[in-house]
Amino acid sequence: ARGAQLEDRRAPQAPSVTAMALALFWVAAVAVCLLAEAKDMGSGWEEKTNDDGKVVQQLKIEAPSMTEEDQYGYTMPDRYRCDSCKAVMFHLEAALRKQHPKSRRMKDWEFTDLFDATCSFTAFEGYGIKLINGENALSGPGLPRDDTLAPGSGAIQMSSENWSKRLGEICRKIVYEKVGEEEIYEQFYKKFKAEEAGEDVSGQPGLSVDLCTKELRECTIGPQAPPKKAEGTKEKKEKKKEKKDALKAKKDKKDAADKASAKGKGDASEKVDAQTFLRNMAVRHGHTSDEYVATRTPAEWEKLVVSIAGKLFNQKAEL
């Protein structure tokens, strides 16, 4: 009896349903907390569970698709010209503010040397293209972009020496050809001087985007004109058919007149009735074939016969 009692004490007891439910609840709660903590890591990382049940982190990288125009040559593609102008203004403004004397204007040779250095391609480092909202866009210093990306994604910038050379070339064209070095300096100095004097500079744009939009017109502002609607395919076909039918009718009429004229000039010994003779004669005289056979009054017939006789006489006289 004592052995049986000890044996009963050693036998494990089955857990109750309530205890099992509580255990499962706490396991699920801990799992949710851990998952939420892992997803809150930021930096664009996304957490997923693979087929083996392991939690993994992944990051989707979006890269721009480079066209041949993007990759080769020293000419800046038109789609990047607005941002290129903004980048040039940013560099010119920064260089002038960094080297400008506080107590005097810069001399001509001073700002000319500064522009030469600023417009060298080595000054435009760190530029390239990046995929922004599904489209390629120029990226780099002075070109703020909305870097908000979808969770689990990132973006990279494709850079090369070509972008620096293109920007340097655009900088030289703006300074020395489109605007002028003196005008560029004056545009900057007016605002710089007003700032030093503590004056209102709202009317002094300086070297800003306004120069790109209003004077250089490298950027389009305001609503763009809607594209011209293409003419419907059905209307095009109908107009084309009408034109074709008109040309065919004109050609048929000419062929019929030529045929009738040739027939009228046939063998002089061939016998024809009066109606055929008059029809052929009308065609030879430049009328429709029924001009001389239409119904008339006796007076009109006499007048027509006299007219025909006169034409026949003139033709014979010319021969």
Image (cartoon, rainbow, N blue to C red):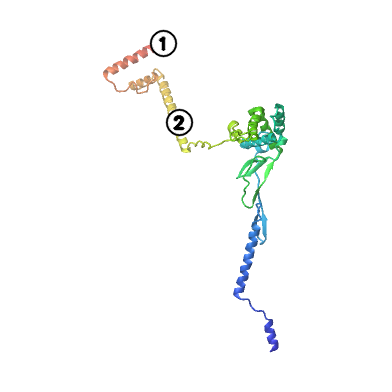
Front residue of this view, candidates 112 and 222: 112
Residue to which mark 2 is pinned? 243
Q: Is residue 314 above or below residue 208?
A: above
Q: Quadrant of residue 262?
A: top left
Kind of residue indicated by mark 2 = Lys
Mark 2 crowdedness (10 Å alpha carbons): few <14, some 14-19, many ≥20: few
Outermost residue toward the top in this view: 317
Identify the residue at horizontal 36%, vertical 14% (top origin): 311
Secondary structure category for the residue under label 1: helix
Residue 20 visible in the displayed image: yes
User: In front of the other: label 1 or label 2?
Assistant: 2
* Residue 73 visible in this rendered orientation of the protein: no
Give the amino acid type for the residue marked by disc 1 in the picture.
Answer: Glu
Please state if 63 lies on the left or on the right of 295 as rendered: right
The quarter of the picture where the C terminus appears is: top left
| Percent of width and height locating residue 257 | 41, 23
Residue, disc 1: 318
Within the image, what quadrant is residue 273 found in? top left
Residue 256, x across and y down, in percent:
41, 25
Vertical relation: 269 (above or below) 164: above
The spot of residue 161 in percent (x, y) is 71, 38
Q: Residue furthest bottom?
A: 1
State the separation of the CA atoms marked 1 and 2.
Answer: 41 Å
